[in-house]
Image (cartoon, rainbow, N blue to C red):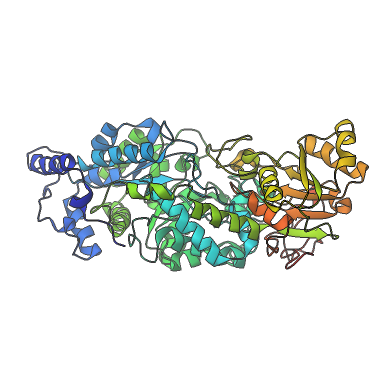
């Protein structure tokens, strides 16, 4: 379904404003292009080939237009007037940055306001609006929240992942946003890294197999449907291979290791025509990727043939010289290295000044600026932004829809990895069940980081169903005489009150939300807090127990795997906890297998298949098929 023609979707007032802008641009303002647009301007003709439109537009652009296209600012630091005055090429929402109220309509209103401001620039070039929709449109209240990538890797189901990409794109496009900073194609090699859950796994072949999510986001052809959005493969390159699992650290590896472990997913992404690639904060062998010509131009663009555009990460160019506050030299180095669009959330004025001076002084060649603009403008034309720049509000009905939640529930069930089972699973709805643990009735813990806010939070942060709620609903629907009781915190005293009343316990334990470097665990990943007390109480009471682990990575269970009657890796399932109970109660047979080696202890990191270590559970482990 092609996008509607520009005039058919644009408000009459804005069409008139565009016409007035074009007329005004014919004046003698020194900042205006020498050949302002008219109704007959070739770049405005959707019947012409994209490359012809790009070249026509590029010939009309002055330096301010071109550098504006290379600049991305954060919505909270600008106004619509900023977009017009600086001719910005892109706006983003950082983690948790949303309009108030946080509704599809408010997002669409905000987006349309920014696009209207872009239409007032001399050439009327639309903006791209980028967000971190990394497991659904996860910043939007009411959106479907899918499992994080680590859980999707456990499904081993590329077709399912493509459907999730398409569903996410629909819920993103409903708000107007047209670019997601996803998928993360890192190959996570050390579970201590705080972004491990953004990876599909430790195996390059597994991560590579999940790249159909790009087609889900973009569609078979970019701009071929109203829900088509730009995808971003990130973070180039080897961000999952830093020493010690340190976020934004240094990946020390040979060229052969780089190519064998970390490059394959990017090759697949390029073959899938991914629109953009984001640079990693990290270094490779001591060189910051944001300033590396060898990585961004020689390898990515020249050798691998990437023809989309390269975007920096949040203030990433500021890390090139290791000192706070980006400098003129950092701007020069980053652009010459091959970055096309620069994410400068608040320091956009300084960036524009530095780059303008650098071009005028010959430190950055105009050919490099033109190359960056060709790459950016090509994607804008392909997406259809010049014909349909405004939000498609008819897609609002897809946000949190029954269809999308059913898809998420399917993904959750397929992501569950049953690691052990002595016969306690599946649980009969005629049983008396105790549901306990920090994650049993906590949607925030269930969803993890990058959910509503950047780091995420415990509590009722999203709309969804917890394991406790799903179990209660399933038992009520079965009407088989079973009961569900809950006790979030267990101690010897509280357990004594319920021990004689239950046949089996479901203990949902694990990590609380985090993202990026806040989630680094240099001393290893372990159970903490009252989850430890809960498991000890269940063990001491001798109650048959199913331990479900909500975590973004394998976690040291403190020996619980030795006495628990069943152990399930539940990952970070998102909004649809019923997918977990579908497996626990036998409605769905388990099919998930481990996307990472599960260490025997926290001290065994890093551990990966083929390194000679013996894990507690191997990569690919998991009981598959009927459990009864």
Residue 536 x/y as whole percent = 87, 40
- Please determine whether, in this image, residue 419 is positioned above or below residue 128: below
At x 23%, y 49%, the residue is: 9
- Please determine whether, in this image, residue 236 is positioned above or below residue 94: below
| Left or right relative to 277: residue 63 | left
Residue 411 x/y as whole percent = 59, 58
Q: Quadrant of the N terminus?
A: bottom left
At x 39%, y 66%, the residue is: 220
Residue 108 x/y as whole percent = 34, 41
Can see residue 311? no
Q: Nearer the viewer, residue 527 or 493?
A: 493
At x 71%, y 49%, the residue is: 475
Can see residue 324? yes
Q: Quadrant of the C terminus?
A: bottom right
Residue 455 x/y as whole percent = 58, 37
**Which quarter of the figure has residue 217?**
bottom left
**Which quarter of the figure has residue 457?**
top right
| Left or right relative to 250: residue 326 | left
At x 67%, y 60%, the residue is: 595
């Amino acid at each position: 379904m092609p996008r509607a023609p520009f005039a058919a979707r644009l408000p009459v007032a804005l069409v008139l404003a565009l016409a007035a802008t074009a007329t005004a641009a014919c004046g003698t303002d020194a900042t205006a292009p020498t050949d302002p647009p008219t109704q007959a301007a070739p770049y405005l003709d959707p019947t012409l080939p994209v490359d012809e439109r790009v070249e026509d537009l590029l010939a009309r652009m002055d330096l301010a237009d071109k550098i504006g296209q290379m600049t991305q600012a954060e919505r909270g630091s600008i106004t619509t007037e900023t977009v017009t005055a600086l001719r910005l090429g892109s706006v983003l929402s950082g983690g948790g940055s949303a309009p108030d109220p946080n509704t599809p309509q408010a997002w669409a209103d905000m987006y349309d306001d920014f696009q209207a401001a872009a239409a007032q620039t001399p050439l009327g070039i639309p903006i791209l609006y980028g967000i971190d929709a990394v497991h659904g449109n996860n910043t939007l209240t009411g959106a479907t929240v899918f499992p994080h990538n680590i859980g999707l890797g456990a499904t081993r189901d590329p077709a399912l992942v493509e459907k999730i990409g398409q569903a996410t794109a629909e819920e993103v496009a409903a708000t107007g946003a047209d670019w997601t900073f996803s998928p993360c194609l890192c190959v996570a090699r050390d579970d201590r890294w705080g972004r491990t859950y953004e990876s599909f796994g430790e195996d390059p072949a597994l991560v590579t197999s999940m790249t159909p999510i790009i087609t889900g986001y973009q569609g078979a052809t970019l701009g071929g449907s109203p829900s088509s959005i730009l995808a971003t493969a990130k973070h180039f390159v080897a961000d999952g291979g830093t020493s010690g699992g340190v976020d934004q650290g240094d990946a020390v590896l040979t060229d052969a290791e780089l190519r064998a472990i970390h490059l394959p997913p990017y090759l697949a992404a390029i073959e899938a025509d991914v629109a953009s690639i984001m640079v990693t904060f990290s270094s490779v062998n001591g060189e910051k990727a944001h300033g590396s010509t060898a990585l961004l131009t020689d390898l990515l663009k020249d050798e691998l043939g990437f023809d989309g555009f390269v975007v920096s990460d949040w203030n990433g160019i500021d890390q090139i010289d290791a000192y706070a506050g980006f400098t003129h030299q950092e701007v020069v180095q980053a652009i010459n290295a091959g970055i096309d669009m620069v994410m400068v959330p608040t320091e956009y004025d300084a960036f524009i000044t530095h780059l303008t001076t650098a071009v005028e002084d010959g430190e950055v060649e105009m050919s490099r600026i033109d190359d960056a603009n060709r790459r950016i403008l090509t994607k804008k034309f392909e997406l259809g932004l010049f014909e349909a720049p405004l939000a498609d509000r008819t897609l609002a009905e897809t946000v949190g829809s029954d269809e999308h939640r059913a898809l998420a529930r399917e993904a959750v069930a397929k992501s569950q990895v049953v690691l052990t089972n002595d016969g306690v699973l599946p649980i009969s709805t005629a049983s008396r069940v105790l549901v306990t643990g920090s994650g049993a009735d906590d949607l925030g813990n269930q969803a993890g980081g990058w959910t509503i806010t950047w780091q995420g939070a415990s509590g009722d942060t999203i709309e969804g169903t917890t394991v406790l709620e799903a179990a209660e609903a399933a038992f009520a629907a079965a009407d088989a005489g079973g009961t569900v009781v809950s006790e979030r915190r267990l101690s010897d005293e509280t357990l004594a009150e319920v021990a004689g009343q239950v046949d089996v316990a479901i203990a949902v334990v694990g990590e609380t939300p985090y993202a990026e470097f806040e989630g680094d665990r240099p001393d290893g990943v372990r159970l903490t807090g009252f989850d430890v007390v809960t498991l000890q109480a269940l063990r001491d009471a001798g109650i048959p127990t199913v331990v479900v682990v909500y975590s973004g990575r394998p976690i040291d269970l403190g020996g619980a795997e030795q006495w628990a009657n069943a152990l399930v890796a539940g990952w970070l399932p998102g909004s649809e906890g019923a997918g977990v109970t579908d497996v626990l109660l036998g409605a769905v047979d388990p099919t998930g297998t481990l996307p990472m080696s599960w260490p025997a202890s926290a001290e065994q990191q890093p551990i990966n298949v083929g390194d000679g270590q013996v894990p507690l559970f191997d990569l690919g482990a998991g009981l598959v098929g009927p459990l009864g």
